[in-house]
């Protein structure tokens, strides 16, 4: 346990965090308030976008994965849940907006904000800090401030004088499919300042209910629903009560609430919104437990202290001030997801739609595993092992509740959306066990991994087992599936070996070789192959779409054998050819037409044909070490760090992907990287730090020192761990968690020996 | 407690029950299987009707309140929940239909059953008994048999030989609004013979979820959903799995499941469906607890034994065989609702959307209180006091969970639909307390009654309190509201007096006089009055609609002062005028145009202008006793018993109204009636029995003997209780529950003394 109170002189790292980074273009981060891994992310949304317009998919949905786009001129409202850095949209629950004047129940448009409750704003009136967001809403002339605890969003609105001050709570709103994804809503107004309810939606999460409790610091004088709200067929009560106004027992599909106040000039009306996945009762209990008072600043400070504790786990000395901003913002972005998914009493709703109690662990949700197995979960294994162990427990609970008997693929809020490919939860589970982080039953974990890997009906797994690869006919992403399954199978084999379960070890080691079956020696690339063993004839090695891969072309994906790069290199013709291949990847000119087809990243997210903004290449630069040219890895790593991350609001070259892009930055800044999670090895790159200290457990610190560090000294002349030379450019997890010192000596010249 | 095993020679009353009575026209009873007050009513539905067609209300919905209309030529399917005798539709959950041949996912039409899964059938192939329903489905040539336990429907289907035998489970179906009321559905197929799930609907119950568990006696070879089922916008999994077939993790708005079998000639496939208001887990637990085997006949027998126990509470000797059928069918119909609304572990979902555990009582739902406060609940106080006490506990729980802080008006499944007028739960609560039946905290009950009666926003209560009547402007049923509120207020006063709470007693005794404020001396009828005290000018004393009353005209409603008939008589001009008024009521000719406007009853439900098929007149015939002409009450009672109830499928003159019509029959057959529940008095009529014995508690029996009983001897010459003459034609509740003998001597001549 970290000390709860941090000495004053140490409280300084939060100031480096700039949550606005990545809020423009495709970073898909949100600027609002949250605590580390908190259940609530209270943040402004700058537009509300339906999934479809005139029955056709509305591509604009993608822009609003996190609800906020820096360049937008209006704020629609403040919502309580947000993904960070995803490539798909959802959440945005419980939109709150203060207004003054005539009641409006719809958001209006960007062009005509006066048609709705949205407001213009200016970045010059905006303050963005960890767990604190402040903005002046120009139209109602309201100062809005937001902060949070784990499960409660805290709003402070400073109103002008008005007898028509309102707080709008638009329960039909939501990111991903405005006004369409909500399928049922309930509101109960318990007294003159408390309301509870739930919203049930079918968005990207197919079946999801968010229970809530709302309290106001001041009694409202009136409340009600939009008069236009959809009526349910004959309900006796319609003629019994005037339900639009001051009627406390509300239900329907599309409900917008208003709460009305008289305000004096500069009067603050505060509001707390607690959420629960289980019940209104639990939402109220969460509120009572976490914020039983109205001291906004206390909540803000407590959250910022939590952030400070989180950031203090790695202290770095860097070359430039902006490097600190990039580093600690990366640490911030790597502590947002997965999010806490249980109430203060431990209850949560499971994948089986039952209420469960998390016994002995914190239950987390929103696992973007295709992204995060690579560096994010290994990063947690180093600095947040308890949380990562709990995340594995959460995945195991998911498995136990799954009627498909599968570990999560891409799960959020007790749903699996089965997004992307592979079954990479096995990588996270195995890595956490082999690194001694997950303390649960490893045999149960192995069973879960094996059953997941044998889910024959899922995405070509049956054919993969039968043929040794996913045939082209079975899946549009047959090659990437094959490569990723092979890696995951290797992970399973590692755990089986560790547990001495020989038959599983042999079966899955055999399966881990399946990458060989989609390599076309003729062209020197991985290539789709049909059931009869024939490679696809029409094939474009640069094109990303429709070529048998997902979020990558074969130039990038052909290097995806992280668990056996030596064999891959041999297959591809040996070290020299391999090195040439890598050189080409980083330096070739990718025609614009291919760029247009590369998902989820900006033009800046690509270096040559190397796509840093998508994950399949995240280990690629280290393959120079395999090729015997580590100096090329070193210089390119420093180039990527410099090139792909900066401190602007558009400072991320692609989706942050729930912390994966940020975890890549952190590892590489420190000088090493987990090329193949499931192994206990980290590969040596080239550090950006002058020095660093990492808390790696009870009182233990791992130190990194770089001698001769400079912007130009990107080459590593010498590496030592505890004064013992590192000869193979690899260090072990045990070297790190034991504490000790990793010493680099850098140089401005490649060291070729 | 009754003995669990009834001696064989006593097992004979079930045979008199004919559940088919009332299934034609407006009886709105259902013929299917259920146990007394069971949560499951498994019964055939003969059509599926949407609430609206082309946006307009479809009056046909009304015909299908109980799902079944005797004259219909096809059966659509068997559903698990049904109201009995209501005038509004809902329920009809989990439609099951066995089919053979091509899969069909919609019901088809009555004219063209071959377009869907429905089937022709014939009443000659139909057997209808308590807890057992059998029919041959002509189209698939399947023999269908149904039985139940409290929470489980048990299906036995005898198939022909086929490799295309199916059991369809249409989860989008439902009574009240076919294909439209379901808002979300989940199905989880756990293995080759078990599925769980839930259906969530917004029908007459605004927000309702039924969880279920289904098991088959034989593994299905395949299963799936309709291919046409509504797709949810982009869900990753659509491209990951073939979800239409053998995919176990299903959710969506409109889902029809099929389970496929190979069957041999005469092969029986059995199916159990358990329901729960709380969770799938609880549904499975209900199944395990109630029917952990596949012995259909055992379940049928156990249920019939429960019915026998219920019927044995009153043993009667009657004049004709058909009288037994009418009597025991009435007892049957008076033991269907309210229904058990909790799982075997006591859990249920409350009006506050939270899961509660019923501690020390059985929680019931579906309270049609405007109907049932009159005779049904008083009837339970006599022969089912434990159940009625639990029903009061259920109402008190409703009150505790109500954000409106009101006792139920017309509640079902944790919703109040606020149907009809008055707040008659107070009558039930008070009657049960004053008769010593409800043992809970009477002061809490009084508080609940008072708060309900002071719910100013409900149906003119505020104005009623302010003006002493509901003004015409405020409500379309201002006069009946006023009259019913005044009676309810008198009930509250009785409880307050009993508890010595003087201020409440005085306040509500004062309110109980409010009936006087809507009596127009000029015309001698109750009449709508506006806020300024002016009676409405245009007023039709025969018309039911739009005249300030609900389900009755002023001819009937002017007599609705059950708590003070003497004062009413005085107001109306004294005994002679009162008697003349009553004579006119029973003998006048009601023009057909008024009949057309009288709800919920057939032409046969009216005698003169006396409307027996609706409830407001149920006490009216006894007012002859007040007028000093009890012989007229006696003959008319016998006439109503003869005229309004018979053994045909159209044997009920109007809706059975959840047992109220049947309870009226039972009381009057026995010779007395609770004219004003909340009082401990029963008024003497004219018995139809030759003799009767009623179990009124631990080992106690109340005997009724009629000397000189015959069809013509409808007049009462003498009444004695325990050999003491009854002089005022009233007996007390304590006289009955003490045990003893009520002796009538009847005659064929009026006894005017």
Image: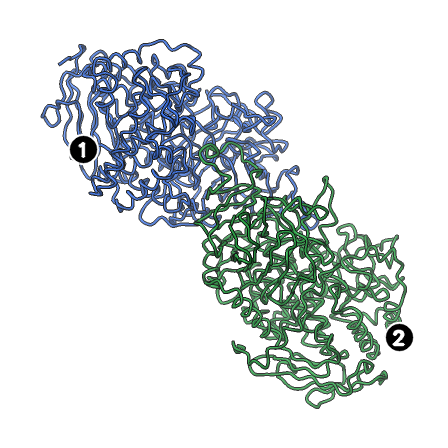
Chain colours: A green, B blue
- Position of the N terminus of chain B by quadrant: top left
Q: Which residue is more in the foreground, B576 or B737?
A: B576
Which residue is labeled 2 in the image?
Answer: A576
What residue lies at 47% left-to-right and 52% top-to-bottom? A280
Mark identifier at residue B297: none
Q: Nearer the viewer, residue A184 or A14?
A: A14
Say what secondary structure mark 2 lies in.
Answer: helix
Q: Mark 2 lies on which chain?
A: A
Q: Is residue A515 left or right of residue A208?
A: right
- x and y, in percent, of residue A321 in the image: 73, 77
B77 up-or-down from A511: above or below: above
Hey, which quadrant is residue A552 in on the image? Answer: bottom right
Q: In this view, does B391 lie above or below A284?
A: above
Q: Output the chain of dot 1.
A: B
Which quadrant, please, contains the C terminus of chain B? Answer: top left
Residue A582, percent from left and from top: 85, 70
Left or right: B289 as drawn, with respect to B226: left
- Residue B195 sits above or below residue B577 on the image: below
Tell me the distance, in whole angstroms, between the alpha carbons under discs 1 and 2.
104 Å
Q: Mark 1 points at which residue?
A: B701
């Amino acid at each position: 346990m970290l000390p709860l109170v941090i000495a004053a002189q140490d409280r300084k790292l939060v100031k480096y965090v700039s949550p606005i980074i990545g809020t423009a273009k495709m970073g898909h981060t949100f600027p609002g308030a949250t605590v580390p891994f908190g259940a609530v992310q209270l943040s402004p949304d700058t537009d509300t976008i339906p999934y479809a317009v005139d029955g056709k998919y509305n591509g604009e949905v993608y822009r609003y994965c996190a609800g906020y786009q820096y360049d937008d001129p209006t704020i629609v409202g403040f919502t309580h849940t947000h993904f960070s850095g995803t490539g798909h949209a959802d959440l945005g629950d419980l939109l709150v907006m203060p207004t003054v004047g005539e009641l409006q129940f719809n958001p209006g448009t960007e062009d005509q904000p006066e048609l709705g409750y949205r407001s213009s704003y200016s970045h010059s009136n905006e303050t963005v800090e960890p767990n604190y967001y402040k903005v002046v809403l120009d139209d109602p002339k309201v100062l809005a401030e937001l902060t949070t605890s784990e499960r409660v969003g805290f709003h402070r609105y400073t109103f002008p004088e008005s007898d028509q001050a309102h707080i709008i709570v638009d329960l039909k709103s939501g990111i991903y499919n405005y006004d369409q994804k909500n399928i049922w809503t309930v509101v109960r107004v318990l007294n003159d300042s408390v309301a509870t309810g739930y919203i049930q939606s079918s968005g990207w999460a197919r079946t999801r209910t968010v229970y809530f409790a709302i309290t106001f610091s001041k009694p409202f004088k009136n409340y009600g629903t939009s008069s236009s709200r959809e009526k349910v067929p004959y309900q006796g009560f319609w003629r019994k009560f005037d339900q639009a106004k001051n009627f406390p027992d509300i239900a329907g599909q599309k409900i917008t609430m208003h709460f009305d106040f008289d305000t004096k000039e500069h009067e603050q009306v505060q509001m707390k919104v607690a959420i629960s996945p289980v019940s209104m009762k639990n939402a109220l209990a969460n509120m009572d437990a976490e914020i039983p008072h109205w001291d906004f600043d206390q909540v803000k400070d407590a959250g910022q202290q939590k952030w400070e504790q989180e950031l203090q786990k790695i202290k770095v000395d860097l070359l430039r001030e902006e490097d600190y901003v990039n580093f600690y913002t990366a640490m911030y972005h790597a502590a947002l997801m997965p999010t806490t998914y249980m109430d203060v009493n431990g209850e949560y709703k499971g994948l089986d739609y039952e209420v469960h109690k998390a016994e002995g662990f914190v239950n987390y949700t929103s696992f973007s595993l295709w992204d995060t197995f690579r560096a994010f979960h290994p990063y947690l294994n180093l600095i947040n092992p308890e949380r990562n162990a709990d995340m594995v427990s959460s995945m195991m609970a998911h498995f136990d509740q799954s009627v498909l008997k599968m570990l999560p693929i891409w799960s959020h809020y007790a749903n699996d959306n089965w997004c992307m490919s592979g079954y990479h939860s096995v990588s996270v589970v195995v890595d956490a066990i082999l690194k001694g982080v997950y303390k649960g039953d490893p045999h149960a974990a192995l069973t879960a991994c094996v059953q997941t890997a044998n889910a024959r009906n899922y995405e070509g797994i049956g054919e993969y087992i039968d043929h040794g690869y996913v045939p082209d006919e079975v899946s549009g992403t047959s090659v990437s599936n094959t490569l990723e399954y092979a890696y995951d199978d290797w992970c399973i084999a590692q755990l089986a070996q560790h547990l001495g379960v020989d038959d599983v070890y042999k079966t899955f080691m055999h399966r881990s070789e399946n990458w060989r079956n989609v390599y076309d020696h003729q062209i020197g690339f991985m290539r789709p192959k049909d059931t009869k063993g024939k490679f696809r004839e029409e094939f474009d090695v640069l094109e990303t779409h429709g070529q048998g891969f997902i979020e990558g072309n074969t130039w990038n994906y052909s290097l995806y054998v992280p668990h056996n790069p030596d064999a891959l290199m041999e297959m591809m013709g040996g070290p020299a050819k391999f090195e040439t291949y890598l050189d080409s990847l980083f330096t070739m000119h990718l025609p614009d037409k291919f760029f247009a087809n590369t998902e989820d990243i900006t033009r800046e997210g690509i270096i040559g044909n190397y796509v840093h903004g998508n994950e399949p290449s995240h280990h690629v630069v280290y393959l120079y070490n395999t090729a015997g040219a580590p100096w090329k890895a070193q210089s390119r790593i420093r180039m990527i760090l410099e090139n792909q991350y900066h401190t602007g609001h558009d400072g991320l070259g692609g989706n942050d992907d729930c912390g994966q892009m940020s975890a890549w930055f952190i590892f590489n800044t420190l000088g090493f990287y987990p090329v193949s999670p499931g192994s206990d090895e980290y590969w040596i790159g080239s550090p950006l730090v002058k020095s660093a200290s990492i808390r790696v457990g009870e009182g233990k610190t791992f130190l990194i020192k770089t001698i001769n560090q400079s912007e130009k000294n990107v080459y590593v002349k010498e590496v030592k761990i505890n004064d013992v030379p590192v000869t193979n450019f690899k260090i072990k997890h045990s070297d790190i968690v034991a504490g000790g010192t990793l010493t680099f000596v850098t140089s401005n010249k490649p060291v070729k020996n």
